[in-house]
Structure formats: C-alpha cells, structure tokens
Amino acid sequence: MNRSLLPALAAGLLAFSACNSADKPTTASQPETTPPAENAAPPMANTTDTAATAGAPGAAAMAPMSDNDFITKVDEGGHNEMGLSKVVLTKNPSATVKAYANKMIADHTKAGAELTPIAKAHGVKLKGMMDAEHQTIREAMLKMSGPALEKKYMDQMVTDHDKTVALFQSEIANGKQADTKAFASKTLPTIQAHDTMAKSDDKMKM
C-alpha cells in the first residue's frame, strides 16, 4: 500500500511546487514595475526647482553697507564710467555713442562735485580714480576701435549702471546719515536714466 501511494504523493508534491514557482514571478514582478513610476516624479520636481532658481538672480538686491562705504563706491564708480567714456571719445565714435559718453562725463563730474563736501563732512578721503577692474577694461578698450569698441563700452555701461542703481537704492533704504541719503535720492533718477539710455543702444535719447 505504501509503495502504491508514492507515485501519487510525488505527483502531488510536483504540482504544489509548480504552483508556488508560478505564483512567485507575479509577486516579484510587481515591485519591478512600481519603482520606475516612483522614480519618475523627482526629476520633474528638480526641473521645476531649477527653473525657479534660474529666475531668482534678477530679484537679488545689493547688501547694505555703511554710509562711508557708499561714498567711496560712488566716487569710484563715477571715475570708472568717466574713464571709459574718455577712451571712447578718442576713437571717433558714432554720434549716438559720442553723445552718451559726453553725458556720462558731464553728469558724473557734477555728481562728484556734490559728493566731495559730503565726503569731507564724513572724513572720507576720496581716491579720485578708477578701480583695478576698470583700469584693466580701459587698457583693453584702448586696443579696440569701431563697432567692437562701442559694443564693449555700451555693454559695460549697462553692467555698471545696473550695479550703481542697486547701490543707490540700498543707500536710500538703509543709509543712516541724512546727507548721504539725500544725495542718493537726488542722484538716483539720473543714474536710472543713464541705465535706460545704455540699454536702448542706438535708440538712446540724449
């Protein structure tokens, strides 16, 4: 009797084993399809974050500084822009660029004259010269001419005036001394006009 049951028992075990092995792939295959769907979401989130970050720099404002540092920066910035403008005027520029350069010299000379007594009142010794970065730019511009020089000059004027507008706005918002804040408030519209004209390129209105 026992021997006659062995074939049936063996067949039963084989059938049970086959069922278990058939069930396992189904349960194992489910985790394989789930992770790709879960992993697909983070890249989309990262793309959105990157796009949001890319637009952030435009909203950055200049960090507050002391009134004396503001005075020093304004004097330096004025000489930077006048120095580059004088280079352009030696290169027979187009009428538009020539008018812009002359305006830079006239307006910054006037602003410098107004800044001088304020600097003295605060005990700030003005350097009266360009910074090292703009001296290097000046040397490069001296070797240029024609449209390439004019483009270099106007691009630099946009860069410099964007920074100067932020500098003046920071002083108006954060300055401690009445005279420096008043100077910043009075001069800011002129600086903003310079910035707008530079960005208008050949459509500038002098």
Image (tube, rainbow, N blue to C red):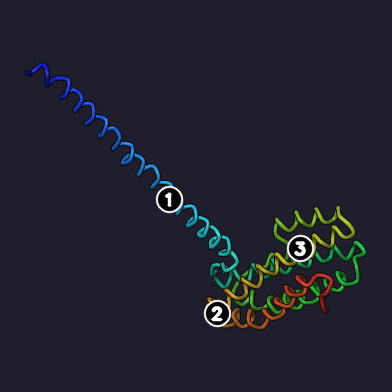
Looking at the rendered image, the quarter that the N terminus falls into is top left
Few, some or many C-alpha atoms within 10 Å of disc 1 (few <14, some 14-19, many ≥20)? few
Mark 3 residue type: Asp
Q: Earlier in the sequence, mark 3 or mark 2?
A: 3
Tag 2 or tag 1, which sits nearer the N-term? Answer: 1
Query: Which residue is disc 2 drawn over?
Result: 177
In primary-sequence order, the first of circles 3 and 1 is 1
The residue at the point 78 percent across, 72 percent down is 200
* Residue wearing tag 3: 155
Distance from Cα at disc 3 to Cα at disc 1:
48 Å
Tell whether 136 sits left or right of 66: right
* Left or right: 16 in relation to 46: left
> Picture coordinates of residue 124 (x, y %)?
62, 70
Q: Secondary structure at mark 3?
A: helix
Q: Residues under labels 1 and 2: Cα distance?
A: 60 Å
Q: Viewed as shown, does residue 18 lie left or right of 80?
A: left
Q: Which residue is mark 1?
A: 37
Under tag 1, what secondary structure? helix
Instruction: Pick whichever, 130 or 167, lies toward us.
Output: 167
Q: Quadrant of the C terminus?
A: bottom right
Residue 131, percent from left and from top: 70, 59
Give the answer, above or below, for where 32 lies relative to 77: above
Query: Residue 184: where, in percent of width, then height?
Result: 63, 79
Query: Disc 1 marks which amino acid?
Result: Ala
Image: 139 above or below 79: above
Give the quarter of the image for residue 53. Answer: bottom right
